Image (spheres, grey):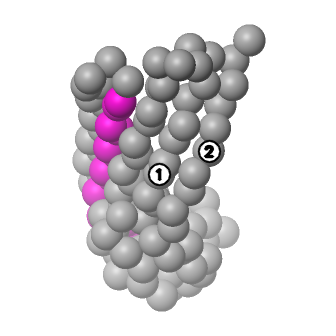
């Protein structure tokens, strides 16, 4: 079918993680791709998707991590799955507790 023949002709991925001040870390991920032609996709065949996250490990609680993430950082309308509209720029917040 159309989904099995949909693949990136070219793809470039970049990710970075930087920890600073012992309590904070920033993560970044970027995926740039040129897909094969697909009649189901209503967006362009070029897509640049990115996410940016901030993590906070407070000193007063060694087993807690607070995280904030922005997904679809550039607000792209690229359809990774043809015909499925992407989520708009979205902000996530979370807390992880380890024991």
Q: Which residue is mark 1?
A: 69
Quick check: is 26 in the magenta stretch? yes
Vertical position of residue 55 compared to residue 79: above or below: above
Quick check: is 96 in the magenta stretch? no
Q: Is residue 6 visible?
A: no
Give the magenta range.
24-36
Are the residues at dot 1 and dot 2 in contact (C-beta closer than 8 Å)? yes
In what quadrant of the picture does the N terminus appear? Answer: bottom right
Vertical position of residue 64 compared to residue 6: above or below: above
User: Which sits in the foreground, 82 or 92?
Assistant: 92
Mark 1 or 2 closer to N-term? 1
Q: Secondary structure at mark 2?
A: strand
In what quadrant of the picture does the C terminus appear? Answer: top right
Q: Estimate the x, y position of residue 34 in percent, counting from the top left.
A: 30, 64
Q: Secondary structure at mark 1?
A: strand
Q: Quadrant of residue 55?
A: top left
User: Which sits in the foreground, 3 or 92?
Assistant: 92
Q: Estimate the x, y position of residue 11 in percent, counting from the top left.
A: 30, 51
Q: Is residue 96 visible?
A: yes
Q: Is residue 58 left or right of residue 9?
A: right
- Residue that lies at the very extreme toward the right in this rendered image: 99
Gap in angstroms between the C-alphas marked 1 and 2: 9 Å
Q: Residue at x 60, y 60 (%)?
A: 4
Q: Which residue is mark 2?
A: 94
């Amino acid at each position: 079918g159309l989904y099995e023949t949909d693949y990136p002709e070219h793809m470039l991925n970049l990710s970075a993680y930087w920890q600073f001040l012992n309590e904070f870390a920033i993560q970044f991920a970027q995926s740039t791709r040129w897909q094969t032609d697909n009649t189901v996709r209503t967006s362009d065949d070029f897509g640049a998707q990115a996410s940016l996250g901030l993590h906070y490990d407070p000193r007063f609680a060694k087993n807690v991590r607070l995280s904030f993430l922005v997904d679809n950082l550039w607000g792209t309308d690229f359809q990774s799955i043809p015909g499925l509209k992407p989520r708009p720029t979205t902000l996530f917040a979370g807390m992880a507790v380890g024991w």
